[in-house]
Image (spheres, grey):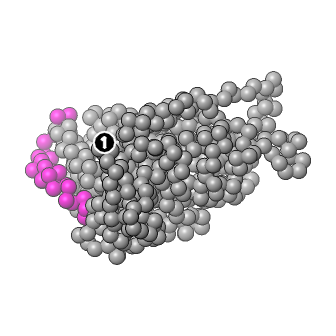
Amino acid sequence: MRNLLDSVLKPVRRASDAGSAQFAEWFMQSRHRFTITGLSRSGKSMLFTSLMTILKYRSEQQYQCLPLLRYLPMDLVENMWVEPLGDLPEFPVEEHMAALEKGEWPPATESVAGFQLTVRLRQTHGVKKYLLPFTDIVFEFIDYPGEWLTDLPMLDKTFTQWSDSAWAQQMNEPQNQFAKDWHAAVSEFDFEQPPTPDAINLLVTQYREYLLAAKAQGISMLQPGSFLIPGSGFDWQEYGFTPLPSRISSDLSSPWTQRFSHHFEVFQKRWLADLKQSTFRETDKQIILVDLFEGLNHSKSHLYQLRETLSNLAQTFLYGDPGWVQRHLLRQQKIAKVAFVATKSDLIPAAQKDNLLALLKDVTRGATAQLDKDEIQFEHFLVSAIQATDAGSNEQALRYVNKDGRYMEATFEPLPDSLKAMPGEEHYPALPAGVPRDHLARILNGNGLDRLFQYLLED
């Protein structure tokens, strides 16, 4: 397969009058800044890979992708190109496609990457087609580790506030199942000793072991998530910290509280503040990816914890409708439209999708209540970045390729349509679908993306 980026990358057009060219370019662009927000394992990387592949085939080869997307009509596409987004590394779409060719899913995101996608449409209306024959639809996308996302709420807290909230979360289901060794270590730790580098490293290492174990078991609300990503940009070995028992954190004279407060402020100023400005930049539309299968695969308490996580995140971003003048002339950005997206919807039969959509609405209830208060438009969607399954022998069954390449069939029990309807100790194992051999065709026929982008592009 030809290099996707090279095949769509076009040279930037130059003009003799740079100022006039810049104004003309600004005037003819309809810029859509998308924040695609997703926790770890929510499918951001696969969604980006599918999107770039689909739009390439749609514009270059007139392939019938995204049939319901009226706002990017194929017959009016003059050109499409991908460019770097600022100084961010390019999104590794070639590496991801190579992984799929080998029968492997793309690896989890461990660093930031971005790209700007421009689709040039021929103008067809009235005088506009003579004055400005083209309209550029510009998309900005950034991929980043989901672990970074859960750290953003820490920007607005003091160390003591964060410590108390983190400790309280560890006492609740399901975190308390995985925090027992960490709590035992804290109860035995001598806080009368000075916070030397060795003592701090011991405590931070034990806390990080808890974070890693909880992550492996599907816990989403883990802070600092940046401690879990190698080479994330923050030196947790030099400026590490952990939540402290309230008897310590409430004592402002404690050397441990003072040292961890200092490290916490370094984390906020040198890492989080820059991260929010460079990666979670101003945007006007937001896609929030939700992996319901991770919670269904574990327990009801995992899904309740996912609801709490999404509620906290809804208070992190800047929402509101700045109006046409502020948005187009003054370039002021607030998120005015949100799409909650349950990914990997191909992993359940079509007969179960109504229940999955209802469950998505229930899990996002806390976040949508915040949006309702701010009068922000939102909608819920089910999408598949790749259709990795086929219909089975009955409406409750699916066929799929397992990791060994064998064609299998699985029959499903009905999914709960709400958290209340899910039995406390019940879980619904996720389908272990492997990469189909005809993965390219299945990417191009991925379902739900046309409805999603139709919603986001309409004003």
Residue at horizontal 63 percent and vertical 49 percent from the top: 64
Tell whether 449 sits left or right of 355: right
- Please tell me which residue is depicted at 20% across the width and 37% down the height of the picture: 201
- Specify the quadrant that holds the C terminus: bottom right
Residue 114 position within the rendered picture, expressed as x and y whole percent measured from the top left: 52, 37
> Which residue is identified by label 1?
228
Corner quadrant of residue 449: bottom right
Q: Pinpoint residue 62: horizontal percent, then vertical percent.
A: 66, 43
Report the residue that reaches farthest toward the left.
Answer: 188
State the residue in front, 267 or 279.
279
Magenta-colored span: 173-198
Q: Nearer the viewer, residue 28 or 98?
A: 98
Q: Position of residue 285 (x, y in %)?
A: 59, 53
Residue 447 covered by magenta stretch: no
Instruction: Answer whether residue 290 is visible to the viewer in this image.
Output: no
Most foreground residue, 380 or 318: 380
Check disc 1 and report its element: helix, strand or loop. helix
Number of other residues with Cα within 10 Å of mark 1, as a class: few under 14, some 14 to 19, many 20 or more: many
